[in-house]
């Protein structure tokens, strides 16, 4: 039987891997579907293709469906995030000029300590630092703000400007931005092209930040439950496959193809394996959990994660907050449970957790026995209780 | 406030930009600013205080305009992607034609419609031309590869051009593949072995 085609818009990034792998490694085929993967030139384009029905599913920044529900971003179509596609995976970097100043000041480039990084940046800059990010509604902005507010840089110590990652090197060279926060491969590209050096992985700020989500139009989820289930299962299996340590080379090769990321497999392997080159001097750093597709129930769209993102959007843009019921209609734990129960995806008993409270791998109650949640600590040790009044 | 609509067109290609501006001026009373490059895009757009911003959907700098949709953004009146319900069909048509439009809050739908109809028609033509160009380039590229593969076969097997092409075609048919794909595989393999 001919597979049913589902068109999916994505940005050519390493964290689109579960979608690409689902198609290339036959996980889609075994669900009787074929993914027509459409690479988009911008995040607004991905969102609009989804909102206006050019595609049925999309790889989206986790804050985008929440921002849309808050009527920000000009598009009001209801979007459901049915699975988390990837956790973590961003990097923060600085221009060559800033790198030189940091080096002169004796900064060790440990790629680990956000408090020390902020103090070092604050010490070498005269005024606010401008950070380039890919999109206004992004984990990049949320992490940068959270980090700056709680450290020496302070709330007014940073400015944030949207710069498409392919233009970041130019923006750094022209002095339009001093620093950046981007997803891979763009951080490694910036380092390799001599545009800058990397100073922190995103996970140093929040250990378990939902980065991209598998999104569909809410009305499509309702009218095509069968297709949605097949899509979710295929993508979930692809994420599980990606979690095996011995597939990284194969995955890097597939992603590096011209039709997908069109950058060298070696560059992609850095993000998949968590072994990053951070400066031109050949400093390498290993970051366990740099980018997760599966471990620690990574795909589960916790409502508490959505609520944290929502509160950051309220702070940033002064928008009207969403109620818990509204949040539950965006991060769809219900659909995640319904469609993934049958594939042996162990599902947590709760749909919300206190974010930041897990300091070491912890077994929690789940449908099939026990699942182990990974640390989700914030760098400042604070916790986010979604039920607090 | 004057009655002229203030429109920003973000477009790198000068000829294309001029064609769009001409079409817009024919369609309505408007003041049009063309912005060609991405440097401080959002700020320059905001400084013009436009009613409508038009940008090619495939333009990667589009995300830089997203800040305009925010109440806290650089414009006095926030804009929306063009999606009001009475114009749902237009939004669809715009996406198909490859134009994204940002429209300030509160602009009358009829005024928006005339601009959008024009923009959609213009961008459709541009998109069609671009697709044709890409198709022509691809065909040309394929012809080159087929010629190289033919040359290799002629040399390796001592056959004439016609026989070489017939061999490529037969192999393609036997394998259920396109002649161009077989030729490319041959050229790649020869490159590896040679």
Image (cartoon, grey):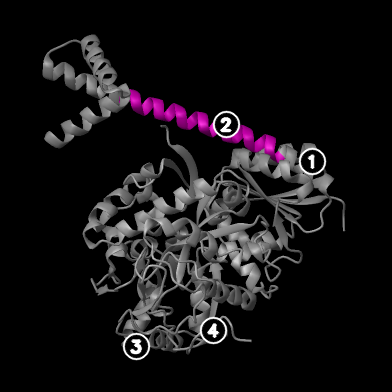
Q: Are tags 2 and 1 found on a single chain?
A: yes
Identity of the residue drawn at 41% across and 88% down: A115
Q: Is residue B70 left or right of residue A157?
A: right
Separation of disc 2 and disc 1 at Cα? Answer: 21 Å
- Observer-nearest of A228 and B116: A228
Which comes sooner in the sequence, label 4 or label 3?
3
Residue B64 visible in the shown view? yes
Q: From the image, tell me which residue sits under label 2.
A: B128
Q: From the image, tell me which residue sits under label 1.
A: B114
At label 4, counting other C-alpha atoms closer than 10 Å, the crowd grade (few under 14, some 14-19, many 20 or more) is some
Over which residues does the magenta segment extend? B119-144
- Observer-nearest of B47 and A179: A179
Q: From the image, tell me which residue sits under label 3.
A: A105
Separation of disc 3 and disc 1 at Cα? Answer: 59 Å
Is label 4 or label 3 in front? 4
Q: From the image, tell me which residue sits under label 4.
A: A385
Q: Quadrant of residue B38?
A: bottom right
Is label 3 or label 1 in front? 1
The numbered mark 1 sits on a residue in which chain?
Answer: B
């Amino acid at each position: 039987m001919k597979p049913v085609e589902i068109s999916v818009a994505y940005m050519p990034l390493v964290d689109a891997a579960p979608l690409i792998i689902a198609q290339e490694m036959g996980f889609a085929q075994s669900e009787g579907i074929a993914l027509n993967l459409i690479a988009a030139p911008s995040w607004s384009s991905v969102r609009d293709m989804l909102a206006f029905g050019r595609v049925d599913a999309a790889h989206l920044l986790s804050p985008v469906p929440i921002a849309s529900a808050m009527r920000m971003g000009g598009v009001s179509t209801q979007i459901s995030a049915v699975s988390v596609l990837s956790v973590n995976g961003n990097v923060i970097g600085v221009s060559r000029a800033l790198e030189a100043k940091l080096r002169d000041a004796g900064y060790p480039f440990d790629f680990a300590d956000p408090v020390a990084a902020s103090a070092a940046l604050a010490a070498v800059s005269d005024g606010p630092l401008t950070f380039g990010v890919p999109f206004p509604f992004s984990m990049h902005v949320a992490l940068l703000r959270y980090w700056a507010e709680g450290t020496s840089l302070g709330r007014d110590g940073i400015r944030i400007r949207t710069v498409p990652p392919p233009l970041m090197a130019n923006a750094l060279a022209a002095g339009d931005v001093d620093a950046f926060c981007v997803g891979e491969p763009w951080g490694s590209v910036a380092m390799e092209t001599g545009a800058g050096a990397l100073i922190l992985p995103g996970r140093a700020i929040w250990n378990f930040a939902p980065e991209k989500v598998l999104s569909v139009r809410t009305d499509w989820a309702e009218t095509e439950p069968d297709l949605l289930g097949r899509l979710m299962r295929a993508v979930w299996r692809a994420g599980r496959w990606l979690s095996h340590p011995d597939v990284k080379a194969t995955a890097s090769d597939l992603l590096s193809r011209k039709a997908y990321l069109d950058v060298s497999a070696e560059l992609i392997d850095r993000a998949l394996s968590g072994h990053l080159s951070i400066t031109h001097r050949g400093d390498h750093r290993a970051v366990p959990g740099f980018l997760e597709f599966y471990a620690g129930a990574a795909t589960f769209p916790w409502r508490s994660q959505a609520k944290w993102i929502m509160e950051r959007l309220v702070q940033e843009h002064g928008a009207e907050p969403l109620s818990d019921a509204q949040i539950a209609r965006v991060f769809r734990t219900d659909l995640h449970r319904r469609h993934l129960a049958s594939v042996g995806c162990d599902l947590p008993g709760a749909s919300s957790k206190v974010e930041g409270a897990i300091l070491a791998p912890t077994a929690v109650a789940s449908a099939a026995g026990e699942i182990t949640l990974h640390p989700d600590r914030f760098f400042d040790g604070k916790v986010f209780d979604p039920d607090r009044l | 406030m004057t009655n002229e609509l203030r429109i920003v067109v973000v477009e790198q290609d000068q000829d294309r930009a001029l064609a769009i501006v001409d079409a817009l001026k024919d369609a309505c009373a408007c003041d049009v600013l063309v912005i060609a490059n991405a440097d401080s895009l959002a700020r320059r757009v905001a400084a013009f205080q436009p009613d409508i911003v038009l940008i090619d959907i495939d333009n990667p700098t589009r995300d830089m305009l997203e800040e305009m949709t925010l109440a806290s953004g650089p414009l006095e009146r926030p804009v929306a992607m063009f999606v009001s319900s009475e114009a749902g069909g237009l939004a669809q048509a715009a996406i198909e034609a490859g134009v994204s439009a940002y429209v300030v809050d509160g602009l009358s739908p009829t005024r928006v419609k005339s601009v959008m109809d024009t923009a959609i028609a213009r961008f459709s033509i541009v998109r069609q031309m671009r697709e044709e160009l890409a198709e022509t380039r691809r065909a040309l590229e394929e012809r080159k590869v087929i010629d190289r593969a033919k040359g290799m076969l002629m040399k390796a097997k001592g056959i004439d051009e016609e026989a070489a092409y017939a061999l490529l075609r037969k192999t393609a048919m036997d394998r259920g593949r396109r002649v161009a794909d077989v030729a490319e595989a041959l050229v790649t393999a020869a490159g590896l072995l040679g």
